[in-house]
Image (cartoon, helix red, strand yellow):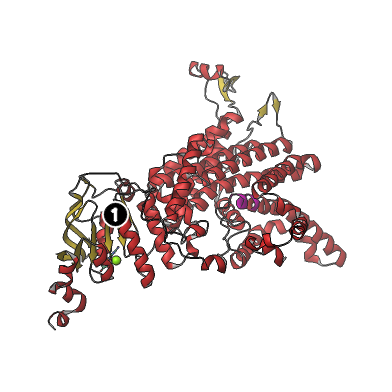
Amino acid sequence: MAELEESPASAPARPMSGSRLRVATLPLVARIPPRVRSRLAVGLLALAALLFPLLHANDADIDSAANALAFAALALGLNIVVGFAGLLDLGYAAFFAIGAYAYGAAASFQLQPEWSSFWEPFHWLDLVARLPGPAGGDVVHFQVSFWLMLPISAALAALFGVLFGAPTLRLKGDYLAIVTLGFGEIVPIVARNMPAVTNGAMGLNGVAAPQLFGYSFGISATPYYYVGVGLVALLIVTSLRLKESRIGRAWMAIREDEIAAAAMGVNRVRYKLLAFAIGAAFAGATGTFYVAKLQTATPEMFMFPVSVMVLVMIVFGGIGSVWGVVVGALLLQMLQSWFLEDLSQWLHGLGRLIDVAWLRHVELASSIELIFGVILVVMMLYRRQGLIPATRPMPALSLDQQAAQIQRGGFATLPVISPQPSPETGSLLAISGLTVSFGGLVALREVGLVVPRHGVVAVIGPNGSGKSTLFNAVTGLVTPDRGSVVMAGREIVGLPPHRVLECGIARTFQNLRLFPNLTVLENVMIGMHARLASGAAGALLRLPRTRREEEEARERALAILALFGNRLVPRAEHLASSLSYANRRRTEIARALASNPTLLLLDEPTAGMNPAETLELAEQIKSLNNSGLTIVLIEHKLDVVVSLADQVVVLDHGEKIAEGRPETVRNDEEVIRAYLGRSAAFA
Ligand code: ADP
Ligand code: MG
């Protein structure tokens, strides 16, 4: 096997016959290109799913499989909320219930209002029928088609998702989990206490079976199984396409680091609501499917344990992994309804054989919670990322690749960065009277600062003097008490971070805020979020315009990585968390550049770099400035400040104590005192 891994560079020197021999011994599968291989796998899977009821004609098992498909659909929906957007939702079954009762009410004998002419148009559309009522007069019988109710339920659940989400999605982590837990509890209680619509705890009865071309599905499991396969296939495609789009990247950015996502132009509220709505829509459609299959609905079907079970399926399969959650859901549901039954039967047989009383009566399916718990603990201990992990770590670069000549990159010409060419001079950013306090601590006091177009301004000062707070106030991450920040003639105080980015201000963070579980390339592409336009429809339909935009974005991201020579390009597909410290700093700068800013705020960009790396980065910052970018830089290394900045601002205890050209500031007594203490200044 060692021969196979030999570097291609040495291959031509070997005799032809040898290499031909090696090719022949390659396993057949490995010779199929990965794209074809995955298509083949999907095709085989689809074929197996379609043939299953024909090859295994056991109605009970087909029924289990159909139920498992319903849970796979639920898991796919919750995966969008929890896996993609990172919003822990413990009340997901609420949306399942809404979709279920929507169909239950629209296609059963539950609601029977008196007939009036109001219903004529609906009658004409065949949505309702006119039946003789028990009390003499005619009544309305709802008979909305299952196929029509699928999208309607999805839309209705999405609407409720937005209604529930709008007030709560500002909460984070544990708080959000508790609120969702609350409405997960409320919905079944409402269902139980609205007997007029839901028939309360007794459950709806007489829910109509779906019909297709005049053929009623009735109670045989096979047609439901095929609807389930279709539903899951649709939701898989939807999930995969969303994940690979601008929207999926925005969700994952929020999941990885909300603050950084906002600073890179992602409208958090909108994308969280979108995730909630789409996740809810999946559950709504699934609810309709499930109720049509069972032909009844009781509040017990939508209680807390269902939400937890779907969550366990996701964790088991792999949070955020589309194929993982499908496999996780199918396996766990089949385990419960199928394998455990069989296993119990075997144990009974074994018990009779060896005459052990408790074995003869053991019922594994009734201990399903315990079994799920054990599975979860084992997964957490040995395979946290789930059966099919969402991200596959790339192998580290080989020693040869790492030792390759460092190329400094082409910062001299920046074809990919085109700050809006502006012949204007004067100030680009004007800050005045900026005051920020955290409780009793005044982090910035009446700070004023003017950044000329195409200039480089350095902000220096001891630790805790308010430098980072200045950046946070400008970029909308903290709200100042007073003061104004005018960017290119426009007041931006009070704008949310993503709007500040849209005004042309991009930043990096002192304590590195990359999206750790995304690749370097994805990190940079999220920087482009505000410059791209595709929405959900474009992503789902793979419109040519969307595909072109994605392709161009990818190329531009690679070109931006190439600005750093071969530092980042070979690592484009690596996770950001695997990078060295210096490369993380470079990736953050690349991500900021991707938004095509006019003003770049760099918070201690060379912190943690060695002298050679510092020099390299200083040169790169210089050439960014030469190509037209205006830069504000927080920096401790005075040689970097002196070589880059036209103007230096010194902060101390939140106040501006000096300002001017680097040489003059360097010799300012106040500055020396701030940095080195009183005695040094008078030595
Ligand atoms: P610098 O970047 O100059 O080292 P910072 O701007 O980070 O300083 O901090 C200035 C002061 O404000 C510090 O005393 C810091 O503890 C305080 N501070 C910064 N951010 C917060 C916050 N979110 N909440 C409370 N205090 C903060
Ligand atoms: Mg700081």
Circle 1 residues within 10 Å: few <14, some 14–19, many ≥20: some
Residue 199, by quadrant, is: top right
- The residue tagged 1 is 626
Residue lying farthest to the right in this orientation: 353
Of the pair 346 and 129, the residue shown nearer to us: 346
On the rendering, which quadrant does ligand 2 occupy?
bottom left
In the image, residue 433 sits, relative to residue 96, either above or below, namely below
Residue at x 87% of width, y 64% of height: 353
Q: Position of residue 374 (x, y in %)?
A: 64, 64
Residue at x 76% of width, y 56% of height: 20
Task: Locate the N terminus and report the quarter of the image it occupies.
Answer: bottom right
Task: Locate the C terminus and report the quarter of the image it occupies.
Answer: bottom left
- From the viewer's perspective, is 652 left or right of 194? left
Q: Is the stretch drawn in magenta largely helix, strand or loop?
A: helix
Q: Is residue 503 magenta?
A: no
What are the residue bounds of the magenta stretch? 322-327
- From the viewer's perspective, is 607 left or right of 439? right
Task: Kindly tell me whether residue 179 is visible in this rendering.
Answer: no
Of the pair 107 and 381, the residue shown nearer to us: 381
Task: Kindly tell me whether residue 273 is visible in this rendering.
Answer: yes
Q: Position of residue 431 (x, y in %)?
A: 19, 54
Of the pair 75 and 258, the residue shown nearer to us: 258
Q: Is mark 1 within 8 Å of ligand 2?
A: no
Residue at x 49% of width, y 15% of height: 117
Q: Position of residue 85 (x, y in %)?
A: 47, 51
- Secondary structure under the numbered disc 1 in the rendered image: helix
Of the pair 334 and 667, the residue shown nearer to us: 667
- From the viewer's perspective, is 671 left or right of 161? left
Number of numbered discs overlaid on the protein picture: 1
Q: Amino acid at mark 1?
A: Asn
Q: Is residue 325 magenta?
A: yes
